[in-house]
Image: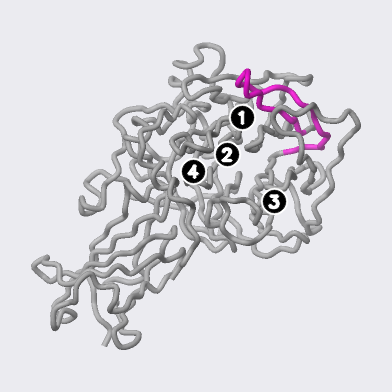
Amino acid sequence: MLRARRPRASRARAAGRTAPILAALAVALVARGAPAQLPLAEAGGLPPGSPTFTTLVYPPFAHTLGIHRARPEHLKLFLGDRTRFDDPQGLAAVKLASDDDPDASSDDYQLTLFGVNSGRGEILYNSTMQTLAIYGRQGSGEGHLDSPHGIAAMPDGRVYVADTGNRRVVRLRWDPVARGLTWAGEWPAGAPFDVAGDARGQLYVSDRSTDGVLRFADSTAGAGTSLLASSPVVGARWPLPADVRAPRGLAVADSLDPWYRPRIYRLYLVDLDGGRLRACGADGAVLAETVPDSLPRPRGGAGRFDYVALDYFGNVYVSDPTANVLYKFDADLHWLTTFPGPGRAEDAFEEPRGIALWKRFGQVFVAEREGAQYFFVGTDFRPLQEPVEVRREAPGTWAFDLWLTEAAQITTAFEDAAGDTLAVAEAGVFGTGRQAISWGESAWRAAPPEGWEARAGKVTIEARPTYSSKKKFSRIRTLRVAFAP
């Protein structure tokens, strides 16, 4: 059983409030068609037509007013003929300190989202909760970008872009008065693909020309500070294994991040041009690795890793634009699930690329070939066998096995052949992967009737996320049940 320190209560409260989430419209995350309604636990499960896959779920209508996916026509609605989607790449989501009222929780989930529009050398972002803006254009000088890829944004206003075609890392600065990005300097890099910052003021850059990762220190250059020093700044090479080749996406896990629970410091790096994902320690040692060909994909075919993001519990999300899925792993790169989108054909991913995950509230943004999607962290589960086999592990203790894709609060309700509820147990919070869902006599809502095990033919299992969508969503399934002798 997982017994985790949870984020503060405003995390749950904010998820349910109505929000003008035009932050998502930095990449034109505007609603199309009918909004996705998420079921309440009291509704008894997912209604007909609801998503099949619920590791990520669309936010409830009350939170977004139906705004959860972008299309080219939506970008045109907000920016006219000024731009168009042209090879979207990296995303970065941040709650800027200059926008945060520490005495109010109502604005905590309102983010600034930056999206790389690589083919046009642009950064698209929401300058306010109601307006979009564009920074940059194709070129090589100040204020120009050439085939950019990754982007990272810090709460103090630092924004970094892997300006691949210009062989540099561009540093931008958020101007809280003008509410826009301004130029703040550049660092040399051979062929940067992605960038990621930690909580200590360090920036990491995957550099394909040197088959390595560069580390730059930039701890004091936030919003409102002066430009970078004029003297050249050179990145120090992270001590990675010598067999790193053609790196792509990367993410940094930092124990000092207040919204990152694991007490670890790691680099997650995609290399072999998308053929491998590794977790490396601070000394560069490989702690775990995986390859896309070892993972299940609903449509089959070849896979390729691209961008990487981490959530509050340390889980690792990786995009695969060739298989049109996201993969989710635990912190040690054990596979948890393959997510193709919520389930309906019109909601399936279309070449997913950059991922931005605001860990505090579990808000997830995914760039696609011609747009982007917006999700909350949900949860999903599957039985390891059917019927579900319930066993007695000790006197007054019961257990069965589930596979969970996200930490969840588990409730079980046993029913007889007529569908009448015999007993309900609040089993507790459990982690990801294979979990023994166990509970004792104190977990029963009411004492079960005599002989309930012999009468039970079904079990209804409810898994409720521990944050993000916890107030508005739960995954409920009714399965056949058997009791071990």
- What color scheme is it? one colour
Disc on the earlier residue, 4 or 3:
3
Question: Residue 295 at what x, y percent from top left?
Answer: 52, 58
Q: CA distance from mark 3 to mark 1?
A: 23 Å
What residue is shown with label 2? 354
| Residue at figure coordinates x 32%, y 35% from the top left | 61
What residue is shown with label 1? 116
As drawn, which residue projects farthest toward the front? 103
Disc on the earlier residue, 3 or 1:
1
Residue 324 got which mark?
4
Q: Which residue type does callout 4 highlight? A: Asn
Q: CA distance from mark 1 to mark 4?
A: 19 Å
Question: Residue 282 at what x, y percent from top left?
Answer: 75, 59
Query: Which quarter of the rendered picture does the N terminus lie within?
Result: bottom left
Question: Residue 170 at what x, y percent from top left?
Answer: 75, 30
Disc on the earlier residue, 1 or 2:
1
Query: Which quarter of the rendered picture does the C terminus lie within?
Result: bottom left
Q: State whether residue 20 is above or below residue 464.
A: above
Q: Give the structural element (helix, strand or loop) at label 4.
A: loop
* Residue density around tag 1, few if under 14, some if 14–19, many if 20 or more, within 10 Å: many
Question: For the magenta stretch, what is the residue range?
Answer: 169-192
Q: Which residue type does callout 3 highlight? A: Leu
Image quadrant assignment for residue 203: top right
